[in-house]
Amino acid sequence: MAEDYAKLVNETVEKFGKDRGRLMDIARALHAELGHLSEDTIGLVADALGIHRVEVRDMASFYAFFSREPKGRATIRLCNAVVERMKGADEVAKAFEEAVGCSFGETSEDGKISLEYTPCIGMSDQPPSALVNGVVLTRIRPQDVPGIVAALRKGEGGGRLHEGGYESSEVELNLRQTGPVVFAPMERGAAIRKAVNMTADDVINELNRARVRGRGGAGFPTAMKWDFCRKAEADAHYVVCNGDEGEPGTFKDRVILTEQADLLFEGMTVAGYAIGAQEGFLYLRGEYEYLIGHLQQTLAKRRRLGLLGENICGREGFNFDIRIQLGAGAYVCGEESALIESLEGKRGAPRDRPPFPVQKGYLSRPSSVNNVETLCCAARIIEHGADWFAAMGTKDSTGTKLLSVSGDCERPGVYELEYGITVEKLLELVGADGAQAVQIGGPSGQCLAPKDFGRAISFEDVPTGGSVIVFGPERNLLECMRQFIEFFVDESCGWCAPCRVGTTLLLKQLEKVLEGKGTRADLDQLERLGVTVKTMSRCGLGQTAANPILTTLRNFPDLYDNLIKPGDFIPSFDLKKAIAESCAITGRNPELEEEHV
């Protein structure tokens, strides 16, 4: 048995060429086969790769989808993001606990099923949702749960689950409105054929004339990024597509990857030509593993058509290919330097900058990291020209923007709209009359009040990576903000104290206010703490983690004012509550005990 075990590990490592950089793939393969990554497995992998086991342990302990201890044959990962909870995920969770016979974070007595929570899995337009061994379940109702659990206990953990009247729905596309850029019909290879008849400088200049900016939220000019990368001297350059769509409420990339994967790979190939790269990577979030077969087939077809590989489109010396790297559950890997660390088979901790990825990225070589939507726009610009693209949108925000809309609206889904549309017009389009608030850009963005619904979605006014969450008039808005902060506490990589400690302090301070134990001084402290976390944190996660609090303090002051009490100080520690259990056990009177203390 021990020999078979060692043989499995060695064969898996051999499959990936004994490449330390493929450690993520090795770990994923072994985890799928063994159900967890034990210390013995970690040691065998380290020996086979010729590295210290701490490197393997460090990586394996970082990602949510890797377990160090045995789990059930089926692991149900129920999404507990804000939108899912708005739509009944808490009731579904109770139903799972009752049907499985254990709490979340535990495994059933028969060892068959484990229950875990997971943050947003890109299905906020069809909640509540869950992953079961990589299979996506959507629109789960409490009454569906017994059938799901019965099917899993019978061993039907893969494919479609059907038992007791429940059949899992396929993932719905929910592409509500197409536009002329990303979701228009395409001619496969058209952009590449135009690009190879231009110089690399001309390709970059065309993007510059189009004034296209990164669609991930930061809005850095794409042409400038490509130019910096191309001019950085090195023996290799790389194209990296950031498909780690982890911002709660965002799912536009899921729809692009389903419907327009060809366009994405076209854009990556154009980028390869422009920056002088021979290899590109699509870093795909682990939650989208169900798309891997479709994406690999698309790549294979492009290779057969001469759109990937050697001498692409007959251009001598233009060699470029793409590999897909699956993640394993870590929100922080959406930050470009953390993504590169993960791509290299390490824990996804953000790097110190400078140097920036365009100078020293993947394997310390110049790397252009671009969002899925950005690369699609780049392909279209080369295909149709800069003037065509720049004619859409606004002066500083050209083209269209994909918006993932979810929450309290009649028509959740993906909308391709020109930059400059107002929040008010968007709410009309999605059927969200009477909205109390709109969270633009996900938890890391800003919460807008009705007074701001006339503002425009654009880089110069209200920027967003794509997430739009609508809160109806009956929602407890500040409780939703508390859940956002809880998300950041869980997802912090822990590297720097302002984020690691600061997010926890923010959560505790906010909870004190929500419990009615806060004063005006507590609100002032909450704001000061938020600013400190924002300005002192090392990467984008910490720098935006306080936004749910800071933007609601600014835009919804009455909600906080209604909760605070007069006076300078109200203790957050309830002594009577703290000693109640011990008094009940010993038969003492908590009132008297409190007096003695």
Image (tube, rainbow, N blue to C red):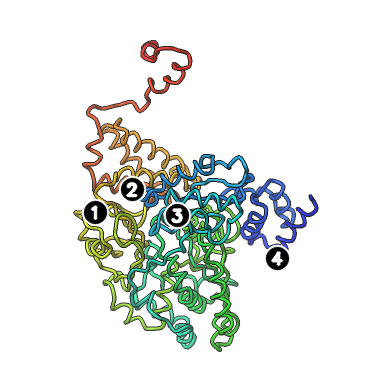
Residue 523's place in the image compared with 37, above or below, is above
Circle 1 residues within 10 Å: few <14, some 14–19, many ≥20: many
Residue in the image at 39% along x and 77% along y: 207
Residue 523's image quarter? top left
Query: Circle 1 is placed at which residue position?
Result: 435
The Cα atoms of the two marked residues, 4 and 3, are separated by 37 Å
Amino acid beneath label 4: Gly
| For marks 2 and 1 on the same chain, the one whose residue lies earlier in the sequence | 1
The quadrant of the picture occupied by the C terminus is top left
Residues at circles 3 and 2 in contact by the CB criterion of under 8 Å? no
The residue shown at (44%, 57%) is 138
Q: Say which label, 3 or 1, has the lower sequence index.
A: 3
Work out whether mark 4 precedes mark 1 in sequence or the reverse, and give the earlier one.
4
Give me the C-alpha separation between circle 3 and circle 2: 24 Å
The circle drawn on residue 129 is 3
Badge 4, how many Cα within 10 Å: few under 14, some, many 20+?
A: few
Left or right, 278 with respect to 508, comes to right
Residue behind mark 4? 17
Mark 2 or mark 4: which comes first in sequence? 4
> Residue 493 or 82: which is nearer the viewer?
82
- Residue type at tag 3: Ser
Secondary structure of the residue carrying tag 4 is loop
Instruction: Say if 524 sits above or below 404 in the image.
Output: above
- Give how far across and how far down residue 94 sits, in percent: 45, 42
What residue is disc 2 on? 548
Query: Separation of disc 2 and disc 1 at Cα?
Result: 17 Å
Query: What distance separates the C-alpha of mark 3 from that of mark 1?
Result: 24 Å
Q: Please indicate, yes or no, whether residue 475 appears anywhere in the rendered image.
A: yes
Which residue sits at x=42%, y=65%? 172
